[in-house]
Image (cartoon, rainbow, N blue to C red):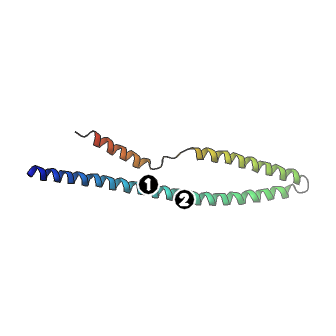
Amino acid sequence: MRDATGLKESLKRLAGTVLSILQTRLELLVNEIQEERLHVEKMMLYGSVCLLFFSLSIMLLTVFVVVLFWDSHRLLVTASLAGLFFIGGLLMLGYLRRMTRQRHALLSTSLAELSNDRERLSHRP
């Protein structure tokens, strides 16, 4: 009778330990998702502000250069700047495509910890 009670208590402790491990891993998973979301939001905000400032500076520089050459070569300067901006846009498009092909290891910490847990449980004496 005593062995059955001891076995029952061991199984309860084992179930409690497994549930505790699962809860910890799920909390880690939720934290990683929240961190990634905040990181993406921050990057979007800074990227938008950066794009705004660069766009304004490029527009003002373009106007300055066109006004500077207004009397002599205004059409040549305007066409040259338009071509330069087009080439810059194509280069950035290529860079963006390369970035989208690279995969970021989302939830890598959680996956590593789950792998460590599985390894520890399988090598127990």
User: Which residue is tagged 1?
Assistant: 32
Q: Mark 1 Cα within 10 Å, few/some/many (few <14, many 20+)?
A: some
Residue at figure coordinates x 63%, y 46% from the top left: 97
**Viewer-proximal residue, 44 or 116?**
116
x and y percentages locating residue 124 in the rendered image: 25, 40
Q: Which of marks 2 and 1 is in front?
A: 1
Q: Camera-side residue: 93 or 23?
A: 23
User: What amino acid type should be assigned to the residue bearing mark 2?
Assistant: Lys
Judging by the rendered image, the residue that carries numbered circle 2 is 42
**Along the horizontal axis of the image, is 69 left or right of 27?**
right
Q: Nearer the viewer, residue 13 or 61?
A: 13
Image coordinates for residue 66, horizontal then vertical, percent: 84, 56
Question: Circle 2 — which element?
Answer: helix
Specify the farthest residue to the left: 1
- Circle 2: is it few (<14), some (14-19), or many (20+) Cα within 10 Å? few
Pick the quarter of the image with the C terminus.
top left
Give the image location of residue 19, x and y in percent: 29, 54
Residue found at the far right of this picture:
71
In the displayed structure, 18 sits above or below 115; it is below
Give me the C-alpha separation between circle 2 and circle 1.
15 Å
Amino acid identity at mark 1: Glu
Q: Residue at x 41, y 48 (%)?
A: 109
**Which label is found at residue 97?**
none
Q: Earlier in the sequence, mark 2 or mark 1?
A: 1
Q: Are marks 2 and 1 in contact (CB under 8 Å)?
A: no
Whether residue 110 sits left or right of residue 58 in the image: it is left
* Residue at (32% x, 41% y) in the render: 119
Residue 21, x across and y down, in percent: 31, 52
Callout count: 2
Could you tell me which residue is drawn at 28 percent across and 51 percent down? Answer: 18
Q: In this view, does 41 lie to the left or right of 88?
A: left
Q: What element carries label 1?
A: helix
